[in-house]
Image (cartoon, coloured by chain):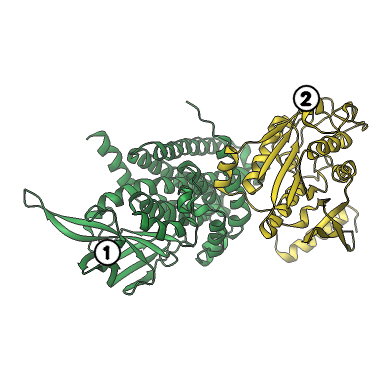
Amino acid sequence: MDFTLSKEHEMARRLFKEFAENEVKPLAQEVDETEIFPRGTVEKMAKLGFLGIPVPKQYGGQGCDILTYAMCVEELSKVCGTTGVIVSAHTSLCCDPILTYGTEEQKQKYLVPLAKGEKLGAFGLTEPGAGTDAQGQQTKAVLDGDEYVLNGSKIFITNGKEADVYIIFAITGVDVDAKGRSKKRISAFIVEKGTPGFTFGTKEKKMGIRGSSTYELIFTDCRIPKENMLGQEGKGFGIAMHTLDGGRIGIAAQALGLAEGALETTISYVQERKQFGRPIGAFQNTQFQLADMATKTQAAQLMVYKAARAKDTQKVYSVEAAMAKLYAAEVAMEVTTKAVQLHGGYGYTREYDVERMMRDAKITEIYEGTSEVQRMVISGNLLK
Amino acid sequence: MKIVVCVKQVPDTKGGVKFNPDGTLDRAAMLTIMNPDDKAGLEAALRLKDQYGAEVTVVTMGLPKAEEVLREALAMGADKGILVTDRVLGGADTWATSQTLAGAIRNLEYDLIITGRQAIDGDTAQVGPQISEHLGIPVISYAQKIEVEGNSVIVERQYDDRYHVVKAQMPCLITALAELNEARYMTPGGIFDAFKSEITVWGRADLKDVEDSNLGLKGSPTQIAKASDKVRKGKGEKVTLDPSESVDYIVNKLKEKHVI
């Protein structure tokens, strides 16, 4: 088994690292403080192809693999969790389902500008009453002539108001099985910003990833052309679940980046900060804490890269993605919390990056499937 | 237009400089980068390509590992990479290096040759002008701005306190300053394509109109008496104080050191 990265991947990492250090890091604190979406950074990333890394060149992308994409999210998140999730949600949750399930016309019309970064993507599944229980959807789409009429709302949508293209899930019917139990038939739709009847609700005030635009989407008699249905009618739930498998690799990479960023920052800090006449890095407690943080972070990296590789090479990678996301998210929370502890009082202030990293890390245990959902996916596979 | 850009893979001095026991640089032990002035020269060539259309060929002389710097150039947008590598070329000083590069470039068609002003490992600033001498073409060094007009280039040549605007007919050679521009990033897809591209590898036999006596260590008139790292500043001291306290603190420090 070879754990070394290819020269291509090493060079790609250097690119992402340089970009993150030069273009993203200087803005990270301000983006968090002001909660302003980093539009300028997104435009720079678009120009360099960062918004279409795993999309084939024929659809305007970079034609790279999922590992390269995961490394991009990782390096961005090392310095700014907000920037990491913008790329992750756009790529995994909007580009990927269109690439996988879209018709050639849909790919040309929507995927090409998304992959080129001319447009930004988002994904709307969660509703006030349907989070982990995705079957609890209320948003409906009723066919009327050549159009579906969409009514309902979606909450906690990443890239919410900033996106141009949205993948939206809605109920298009109800099936009753042999035992008389009814099951909602969910379908996926590509919805453009600006469609009459599609408006935005309130912006969420969040604990972390504060520059990320998180909004409620409201659909009131919003008419969507029939040809904007993504995949087959009634197959939306499967599309959503498969899309989230991929999304989890992106979020796992974000969590990994946050852990790595906190670890690097802490390694520097403990060599500078002196107490009792010695750098605090000279104390065994600090050394042992760092050793544990580094070991777990490396384990998370191996799992994230393995999951990315699995998506490149396997048809089904749900378990790898769930394990990577579960572990990386919990490591991110643990490592960033320890990083704050090792920074002491300074770490609790917003002057220091680790404070932001700890707040950013928490969401990775929640969105795109909570840690509990990941455990359900993993154990469900063990006991099937 | 055909542009040849000469680049050098140099040690990344940010990672610290390491020496062999004989005083020469231990290149294998150090991280490497594309020499900053050369990167500016490449960026200038790529901008001319964007503006006027051009074929950009990047040439480097070095160990087989120097291929990396050509891949990077391709990932930024260069069209071809040529690696000149041969044991007999090892130990070259600026004279032997410029002879080697001129011997390689004689095989190529070119309107413009761009090199960096100087490399951060040797800081000589001699190779570019020497190549122009060997090829018998004009040189404009220290370029801070480059424009093309017909078959001429118009270059702002930097001095300490001013610049000269110099016009030269192509073919000619320009040496670029790092300040000339901000080099573009590679693209992810560009990187993967660069590794699929073929790098042309030339050895001694491929060099045109060059005498053996001008190549490698034997062809190098320079004798290195001693090589050393730049003298680094001390670690310094970091204090966090209120503005009023910090003024007193600094003044006291300066008094302690008898500066004031």
Q: Chain of mark 2?
A: B
A359 up-or-down from B118: above or below: below
Q: CA distance from mark 1 to mark 2?
A: 68 Å
Q: Is residue A300 left or right of residue A377?
A: right
Q: Chain of mark 1?
A: A
Q: Which chain is yellow?
A: B
For chain A, the rendered hue is green
Residue A306: x percent and y percent? 43, 36
Q: Nearer the viewer, residue A310 or A157?
A: A310
Q: Which residue is mark 2?
A: B87
Looking at the image, which residue is at 86% across and 60% down? Answer: B167
Can residue A109 be seen from the camera position used here?
A: yes
Q: Is residue A2 left or right of residue A177?
A: right
Q: Nearer the viewer, residue A69 or B128?
A: B128
| SS category of the residue bearing label 1 | helix
Q: Mark 1 Cα within 10 Å, few/some/many (few <14, many 20+)?
A: some
Q: Residue furthest left?
A: A179
Q: Amino acid at mark 1?
A: Lys
Q: Nearer the viewer, residue B197 or A61?
A: B197
B254 up-or-down from A202: above or below: above
Q: Is residue B53 left or right of residue A361?
A: right
Badge 1 vs badge 2, beta-carbon distance below 8 Å: no
Mark seen at residue B214: none
Looking at the image, which residue is at 55% across and 34% down? Answer: A6
Q: Nearer the viewer, residue A364 or A227?
A: A227
| SS category of the residue bearing label 2 | helix
Q: Which residue is mark 1?
A: A226
